[in-house]
């Protein structure tokens, strides 16, 4: 069973990495996907931040190759493989889902995030750079992306408040989620990735939407302080 699961992780990691080649590009929900179109929502990071996917795809594949080659029977690796496999399996068609439905895109990216976070929490304490690091970055980005999707979709459907209010709610949600996960598994890679996403929000909003930039900067400061403090203990 362990060898089958480790092989499945490799297949899914490769399929996940190549899936963008078979799907129309996705750069945010189109106006026709939401009742209230969200054009450049303030919760969305600047475009350059999404380049992190190149690192995520590559590192997950390298991790899967090593896992199948060297750690196929390792019990500590196996404990984290099932939730990771679920996350990757949902991730393979995610771009197609996102291009079709904002609601289903939000639901499925939350599932992806929960699977990745569970895998991170269960990650082996050895082989840090071969499992915890790539999965931590993957889980961190999905945590941030889930709140971006929640905020954009909720604003698009006019739930409670508009895009400005949901930008604050999404940043607060990402910050709270990050601290909760980090308490369960102190993976620096996870926090650093969410900091990366928050920096992207600051860059995207600049001084035009200064309150959102300031709140994102506050989140960066909180996560940086948490990271530095935990590394000194």
Image: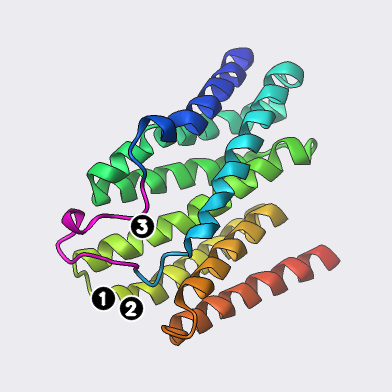
Measured in 3D between alpha carbons, the distance from the residue under mark 3 to the one under mark 1, in whole angstroms, is 14 Å
Residue contact between numbered discs 1 and 2, judged by CB atoms under 8 Å = yes
Mark 3: which secondary structure? Answer: helix
Q: Is residue 146 visible?
A: yes
* Quarter of image, res 129: top right
Identify the coloring. Answer: rainbow
Q: Is residue 233 visible?
A: no
Residue 30 magenta-drawn? yes
Apparent side of residue 81 relative to residue 229 in the rendered image (left or right): left
Report the number of numbered marks: 3
Give the number of the disc on residue 149.
3
Question: Considering depth in this image, is 189 or 75 the residue closer to the camera?
Answer: 189
Q: Quadrant location of the N terminus?
A: top right
Apparent side of residue 155 relative to residue 223 in the rendered image (left or right): left
Name the spot of residue 93 as percent of width and height, x first.
Answer: 36, 33
Name the spot of residue 21 as percent of width and height, x first.
Answer: 42, 32
Tell me which label, 3 or 2, sits earlier in the chain: 3
The residue tagged 2 is 165
Measured in 3D between alpha carbons, the distance from the residue under mark 3 to the one under mark 2, in whole angstroms, is 14 Å
Apparent side of residue 179 relative to residue 150 in the rendered image (left or right): right
């Amino acid at each position: 069973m362990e060898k089958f699961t480790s092989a499945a992780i490799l297949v899914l990691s490769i399929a996940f990495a190549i899936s963008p080649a078979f799907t129309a590009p996705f750069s945010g929900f189109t106006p026709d996907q939401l009742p209230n179109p969200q054009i450049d929502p303030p919760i969305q990071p600047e475009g350059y931040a999404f380049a992190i996917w190149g690192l995520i795809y590559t590192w997950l594949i390298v991790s899967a190759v090593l896992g199948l080659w060297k750690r196929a029977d390792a019990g500590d690796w196996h404990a984290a493989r099932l939730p990771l496999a679920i996350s990757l399996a949902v991730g393979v068609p995610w771009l197609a889902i996102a291009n079709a439905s904002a609601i289903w895109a939000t639901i499925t990216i939350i599932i992806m995030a929960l699977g990745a976070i569970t895998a991170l929490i269960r990650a082996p304490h050895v082989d840090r750079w071969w499992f915890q690091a790539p999965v931590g970055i993957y889980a961190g980005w999905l945590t941030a992306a889930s709140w971006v999707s929640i905020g954009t979709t909720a604003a698009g459907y006019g739930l409670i408040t508009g895009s400005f209010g949901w930008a604050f709610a999404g940043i607060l949600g990402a910050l709270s989620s990050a601290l909760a996960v980090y308490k369960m598994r102190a993976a620096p890679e996870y926090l650093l990735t969410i900091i990366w996403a928050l920096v992207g929000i600051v860059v995207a909003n600049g001084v035009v939407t200064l309150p959102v930039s300031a709140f994102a900067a506050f989140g960066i400061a909180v996560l940086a302080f948490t990271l530095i403090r935990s590394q000194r203990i």
